[in-house]
Image (cartoon, rainbow, N blue to C red):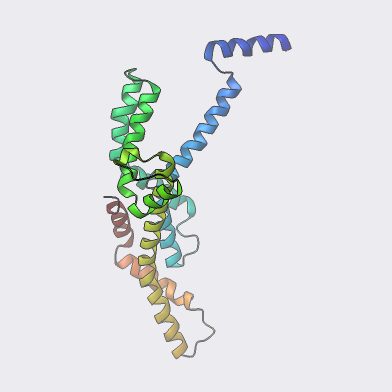
Amino acid sequence: MNPVGMTERIVEAGGQGGLAAPLQVALFLGGMALLSSALVTLTAFTRIVIVLSFVRRALATQEIPPTPVLLGLSMFLTFFVMGPTFENIEKKALSPYLAKECTVEDAFQRGWGELRVFMMKQTRKGDLGLFLDLARIGKISTPDDVPARVLIPAFVTSELKTAFIMGFCLYVPFLLIDLVVAVILMSLGMMMMPPVVVSTPLKLLLFVLVDGWPVLLRSLSLSFS
């Protein structure tokens, strides 16, 4: 192919579309990576996936449920929890932009405003105050005055703390089963028998009898209300 002709095509494409095709692809891939990071840090995903991981470790079932199953369940439960917020974003930001009733900047501000409401509701005052002090920002009059660079890490920190508290509460009953099984095996003189061999079926039985998955998912969903 003639190099001059190829150059003319790229220049022509850039003049018509604003950006050359390779640069558009690079920006698209970068946007997808940023979108995945936003899904993890700006939504309910962090708390949900950590709590589900704690459950798997507490049951001592190794890789059961498999990691893709936990990630998939966490993602769709995140969409369920974030449903009202996403609906408001679609109604107040995305639809007006697609109808050319507002600019990209206005749509972004409206969408971020709806997401900010959710994040502020789930962020602890202590964590928010910590990052305000680190950023050397004085007292704020309204939640809208909190900058994104302060709100986002404060929200993630609060989600981690809440997830670990829920994980600890989930661990306690299963830990008691491990202790009881270990004491019984020692009293029977079965020193060489690993307690996990006996305790794992008992923990699975307990989890099934109390209808564990529906109770857990219900508790996770209500923890955001």
Q: Is residue 196 left or right of residue 25?
A: left
Give the total of numbered labels.
0
Q: Position of residue 213 (x, y in %)?
A: 33, 58
- Observer able to see residue 156: no
Q: Where is residue 182 in the image (x, y as percent from the top left)?
A: 45, 82
The relative height of residue 21 versus residue 28 in the rendered view (above or below) is: above
* Quadrant where the N terminus is found in the figure: top right
Q: Which of 211 and 144 is in front in this view?
A: 144
Occupied quadrant, residue 38: top left
The relative height of residue 143 versus residue 213 in the rendered view (above or below) is: above
Q: Where is residue 130 in the image (x, y as percent from the top left)?
A: 41, 52
Q: Residue at x 36, y 34 (%)?
A: 112
Q: Residue at x 33, y 43 (%)?
A: 140
- Observer able to see residue 6: yes
Q: Position of residue 102 (x, y in %)?
A: 34, 20
The relative height of residue 189 versus residue 10 in the rendered view (above or below) is: below
